[in-house]
Image: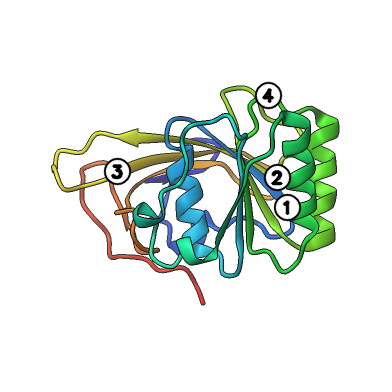
Amino acid sequence: MLKDGSGKRLAPAVGDAFALRPARVHEATGRGRRAFALFQAARHPGPLIWVLPAYLPELPMPWGLPKGVSARLHLLRPAGETDLLWCVEEALRAAPTGLVIAEPQQPLSLLAGRRLQLAAEAGRTTGLMLIRQDAGSNATETRWACEPQASPASDSTLHHWSLNKNKQGTLGHWVLNWDGASTAFHMVSETGERYQPAEPPL
């Protein structure tokens, strides 16, 4: 389901509804933020860089990633927050990187957010910061709230993704069924009806 900022219901979205504007930095928060990041990783061609602190025990496991992601993924494990932000800046500037994902553990200041935006513009690279609740920067291009959602079907994997900030367009929220293995997904209506699979544009 898709609604605009006023709550008006819109037509079901297609693959480009979740396209992140290139050469900009975006944010995702919520329990489903890593699933959103993997969804984006599968849809972005080229090298992928994931930056997360060295002390975090959780790591992306190659055999559990969407098809084609593990072969393109490079993990950076900086020791602290300052090093993490430096790594993100350098990765964003290093064209032709397809997507830079990072997991800062501290709130992002306006200054840090602006520096990341400038780096993304310089490298023509898309960035996605996986932030904690209320820890984002005002400089971000878009901010997504991502939560898993219970499904009446045991074989379904539902995600509720809300676009809460968007400098270039309207806001909205979607419920979709994505299996975590490919770029294909189904939009889900309020009644649980599934739409046809959507693929991102070539």
Residue displayed at 53% across by 36% down: 6
Residue displayed at 47% across by 46% down: 36
Residue corresponding to mark 4: 106
Q: Is residue 176 left or right of residue 118?
A: left
Above or below residue 170? Residue 32 is above
Look at the numbered discs 1 and 2 and tell me whether their residues touch, using CB distance below 8 Å.
Answer: yes
Q: Residues within 10 Å of mark 2 (few under 14, many from 20)?
A: many
* Amino acid residing under circle 1: Arg
Pinpoint residue 43: horizontal percent, then vertical percent. 50, 63
Residue corresponding to mark 3: 158
Residue corresponding to mark 2: 141
Look at the numbered discs 2 and 3 and tell me whether their residues touch, using CB distance below 8 Å.
Answer: no
Q: Secondary structure at mark 2?
A: loop
Residue 133 vs residue 52, the one in the foreground: 52
Residue corresponding to mark 1: 24
* Amino acid residing under circle 3: Leu
Q: Is residue 9 left or right of residue 123?
A: left
